[in-house]
């Protein structure tokens, strides 16, 4: 069926299925957004003035999603995702017991595993936590409010290494990986089991409306999809990453039907060879990070991903799409970009068909 804010949704889903399978699409997969033509100017919904309410007022969140989707053109593989934003309130770190501070723009955690060591018995999911109960209510709201309009997502609630870094504190965890590596590995495997438990619960809420799933990373899958990541890996060697965290990522990939790995930051590029060896991983996103050059500055890394037979995701300005398609194979390539107008976005989609090659 079509969606109010994505009339070609059925065609888009077919293209996603083909892209996950590594099939030729006639062009690269291209998600391009722009301000939507013909929508009358109007102010956004009034934001609550208190931080907790700003992130938890379901009426405001529903109105904000509707406003944003109504004013956006979603071209190609772009589609409207219903979400509440990701300041950390709807995350495993919170539900495990990390103290949370919210402001009007973001949020941050303080660690709760503050001793010299810890036990797995210390790490339990508190399903009576108010924010966990809110997450269930939020996803039910998303599933209902997005019917016929957009796609509800499971959110961004944690990942390999990073949930442990929040619970332990990054500096302590940097010491732990040297002093107690086996405990780190076993703890993160335990956390992934809890993550899978959460995902299954959330997926059962949103999948009937989503026809599959999406998350904070705007790709769609007909099954269970999430963006795997370990931003903590930026600080450790490839050998340590393989030893401590690859087993955790493999457990996550074995559970999911489709996954992209979010390689965030140039120091994390050192882990690309190990990630390319994972048979259950379909795609890698190469993201240089804030203040760094375009992904096209790192063509050797991009080509390494494609040479390994993996799909490749990059986010670039619309002015670089032609260059990207000159340098890279369009098969399995996913480009996310934006244009200043809907007309420019439509033209870019037409040109992408001319520029793409295997």
Image (cartoon, helix red, strand yellow):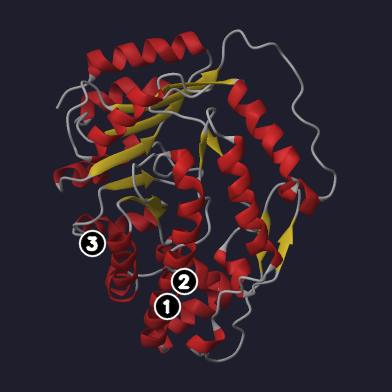
Q: Residues within 10 Å of mark 1 (few under 14, many from 20)?
A: some
Crowding around mark 3 (Cα neighbors within 10 Å: few <14, some 14 to 19, many 20+) is few
Is 61 situated above or below 191? above
Residue 216 visible in the picture: no
Q: Callout 2: helix, strand or loop?
A: helix
CA gap, disc 1 to disc 3? 22 Å
Q: How many marks?
A: 3
Picture coordinates of residue 300, whole percent (x, y): 23, 43
Tell me which corner region of the image, top left, top right, bottom left or bottom right, holds residue 349. Answer: top left
> Which secondary structure, mark 3?
helix
Tell me if label 1 and label 3 are in contact, CB under 8 Å: no
Q: Which numbered marker is on residue 274?
A: 3
**What is the CA distance from the residue labelled 2 to the residue labelled 1?**
7 Å
Q: Would you say the residues marked 2 and 1 are in contact, meaning their CB atoms lie under 8 Å apart? A: yes
- The x and y percentages for residue 20 are 25, 40
Residue topped by disc 1? 190
357 lies left or right of 229:
left
Residue 300 visible (yes or no): yes
Image quarter (top left, top right, bottom left or bottom right) of the N terminus? top left
Which residue is at the front of the view, 188 or 129? Answer: 129
Q: Is residue 191 left or right of residue 300?
A: right
**In the figure, residue 323 lies in which quadrant?**
top left
Q: Is residue 176 left or right of residue 309?
A: right
Mark 2 or mark 3, which has the lower sequence index? 2
- Label 1 sits on a secondary structure element that is helix
Image spot of residue 107 (x, y percent) = 68, 57
Q: Residue at x 38, y 82 (%)?
A: 186
Towards the viewer: 183 or 3:
3
Q: Residue at x 57, y 10 (%)?
A: 37
Q: Residue at x 35, y 45 (%)?
A: 286
Residue 194 shows which numbered tag?
2
């Amino acid at each position: 069926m079509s969606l109010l804010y994505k009339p070609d949704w059925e065609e888009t889903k077919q293209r996603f299925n083909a892209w996950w399978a590594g099939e030729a699409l006639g062009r690269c997969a291209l998600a391009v957004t722009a301000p939507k033509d013909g929508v009358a100017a109007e102010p956004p919904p009034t934001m609550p003035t208190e931080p907790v309410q700003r992130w938890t007022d379901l009426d405001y969140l529903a109105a904000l999603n509707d406003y944003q989707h109504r004013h956006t053109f979603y071209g190609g593989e772009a589609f409207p995702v219903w979400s509440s934003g990701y300041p950390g309130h709807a995350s495993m770190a919170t539900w495990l017991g990390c103290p949370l501070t919210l402001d009007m723009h973001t949020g941050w955690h303080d660690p709760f595993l503050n001793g010299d060591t810890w036990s797995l018995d210390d790490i339990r999911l508190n399903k009576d936590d108010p924010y966990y109960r809110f997450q269930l209510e939020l996803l039910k709201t998303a599933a209902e409010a997005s019917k016929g309009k957009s796609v509800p997502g499971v959110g961004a609630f944690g990942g390999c290494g990073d949930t442990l870094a929040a619970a332990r504190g990054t500096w302590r965890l940097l010491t732990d990986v040297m002093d107690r590596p086996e405990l780190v590995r076993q703890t993160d495997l335990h956390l992934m089991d809890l993550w899978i438990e959460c995902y299954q619960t959330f997926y059962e809420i949103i999948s009937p409306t989503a026809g599959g799933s999406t998350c904070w990373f705007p790709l769609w899958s007909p099954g269970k999809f999430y963006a795997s990541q370990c931003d903590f890996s930026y600080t450790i060697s490839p050998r340590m990453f393989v030893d401590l965290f690859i087993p955790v990522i493999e457990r996550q990939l074995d559970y999911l039907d489709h996954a992209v790995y979010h390689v965030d930051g140039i120091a994390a590029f050192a882990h690309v060879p190990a990630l390319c060896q994972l048979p259950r991983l379909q795609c890698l996103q190469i993201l240089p990070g804030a203040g760094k050059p375009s992904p096209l500055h790192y063509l050797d890394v991009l080509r390494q991903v494609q040479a390994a037979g993996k799909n490749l995701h990059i986010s670039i300005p619309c002015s670089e799409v032609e260059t990207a398609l000159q340098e890279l194979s369009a098969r399995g390539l996913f480009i996310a970009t934006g244009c200043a107008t809907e007309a420019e976005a439509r033209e870019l989609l037409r040109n992408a068909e001319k520029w793409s090659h295997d």
